[in-house]
Amino acid sequence: MLLRTLIFFLFSLPIFLSAQFVDSSRQDYKAYYYESGELSSEGYLEDGKPNGYWITYYPNQLRKSEGNRKDFLLDGPWKFYDEKGNLSQLITYKAGKKDGRTELYEDCHLAELSIFEAGVQIGVQTQFYPDSSDSLIKATIPYQEGVKDGIARFYAKDGRLVEIVTYKKGFVAAREKVNQKDADGLKQGLWKEYYPNGRLKTEKRYKDDKLNGYVKEYSPQGKLEGAELFLKGEQRSEEENEADFEIRYTYYEDGSVKSTTTYNLADEKDGVAQFYDREGEVQSAEIWKNDYLIAKGIIDRAGVRRGDWETYYLDGKLKSKGTYRAGEKYGKWVYYFSSGEVEQEGYYDQAGRFTGEWIWYYENGSILRTEEFLRGIEDGLLVEYGLDSTIITKGEFLDGEKEGEWFYQLNDHQEIGKYLYGERNGYWEHQYPNGKVSFKGMYESGRPHGEHKYYNEKGVLIRKEEYSFGVKDGRWKWYDDNGVEYLSITYKDGEEKKVNGEKFKLNTN
């Protein structure tokens, strides 16, 4: 508890620093007012544009936002407040883009902490229970290149890990509920505990708050060190552990087997149940886990899946359906959200690999992504859509590598350029939402080459860089929003040689 309180204090330290003020005696000071006469905003103007520190106000004269501008762009920490004067957001900017910490608050408590770099979210986003004075963690969600990517963990207010979600490039690849309690507070189902290094430490199963199944213990290196069997809270002896499962039979009137079903020591269906016709041929099969039906279809006498299959969520709702051939998924398969809406659909080839067009959906039914595959590898057109059905990514793969022209629509700009063998190659251009070019430059095998130019939203050049196959080489220039040069640095083989025309000397004293 003390550690969490300390973490919260460190996270929140910038909030409690003394408020800054604007010097109204300065010649470049400017104030704006509401029609009613109350102060609306104040700060400094340069060439008629806001620059330096600015504060905006609500009509009740409480601060609405405050922060600094550098070269007319948002820079450093910016604070945003609600109408009661409580801090709602603390965002760090650099050159007009989020860069560093972004903190969201609810009722004066930290609710979310994110990290950005050049406007793109990276690292681990940490969410907190906002009604908790000691900043209890609600979730940790990893981001890479602006999308969720990696293993996210969700926690209950008592600190229990309750859900593990694996994301791959923004999409949910796997989801697992753990450490669950029912409405009466009784432990149910799978419980897991982890070492600080993230490896599994213990794995247990409960039924009505009693251990029911194997208790497994692992070393910090991931090796299984021991397993003990419990049944309704009581530990079973080694002799009793030898027969973990029982196969039960039903019969036709003539004595031929009608069905076989596997039960565990907790008297739960656990494993394969098969159903036969009077000639002894398998007609259907079911797969159970701790008395939950998780799949049904056909498994032949050799244990190979074939024919039509369905899988289910633990609440019995359909999770997926499709066909098996010789033990491999084949033909069309459809996967569903727990709400019943289609999540993704597409085809498998004879080897059980993705083939042809696959479609992913948002839960509201609109298309999220379409992608083409060949022999399980991306090969062909990929198109990704936003919730409003606008295209946010478009390009082609060849043998699993990006190839040819690609388009990206990011938060504050779009990017257009070409790939060769999975690397950026040739001319690339970025554009602002108003259509003005924000960047243009060349790449050679993924490395910047030649001139790279950056522009403001009015189309004025603000920075020029020079590269030689990924290495800084030549004269770099910086310009103000009017296109006037104010800084230049000359590089040779990646090292600074001159600043504003003067030779650069490293002080070694």
Image: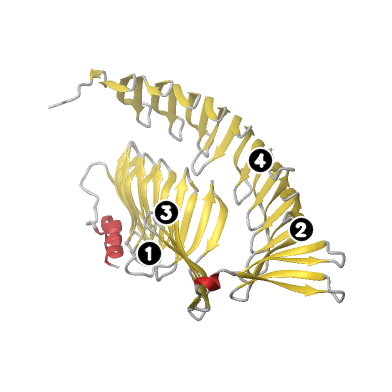
Closer to the observer: label 4 or label 2?
2
Q: Are marks 1 and 4 in contact (CB under 8 Å)?
A: no
Closer to the observer: label 4 or label 3?
4
Residue at numbered disc 4:
376
The numbered mark, 1 or 4, whose residue comes first in the sequence reads: 1
Residue 191 point in image, percent of width and height: 48, 67
Q: Amino acid at mark 3?
A: Gln
Q: 313 or 117: nearer the eye?
A: 313
Residue 132 point in image, percent of width and height: 36, 69
Between the C-alphas of marks 4 and 3, the distance is: 32 Å
Between the C-alphas of marks 2 and 3, the distance is: 49 Å
Q: Secondary structure at mark 4?
A: loop
Q: Residue 286: which quarter of the image?
A: bottom right
The numbered mark, 2 or 3, whose residue comes first in the sequence reads: 3
The numbered mark, 1 or 3, whose residue comes first in the sequence reads: 1
Q: Amino acid at mark 1?
A: Glu
Residue at numbered disc 1:
83
Q: Are marks 4 and 2 in contact (CB under 8 Å)?
A: no
Residue 259 marker: none
Residue at numbered disc 3:
125
Q: Is residue 31 visible?
A: no
The numbered mark, 4 or 2, whose residue comes first in the sequence reads: 2
Q: Are marks 1 and 2 in contact (CB under 8 Å)?
A: no
Q: Considering the image in quadrants, where does the N terminus appear?
A: bottom left
The numbered mark, 1 or 2, whose residue comes first in the sequence reads: 1
The numbered mark, 4 or 3, whose residue comes first in the sequence reads: 3
Q: Secondary structure at mark 1?
A: loop
Closer to the observer: label 1 or label 2?
2
Dot 3: few (<14), some (14–19), or many (≥20) neighbours within 10 Å? Answer: many
Residue at numbered disc 2:
301
Q: 193 or 431: nearer the eye?
A: 193
Between the C-alphas of marks 1 and 4, the distance is: 54 Å
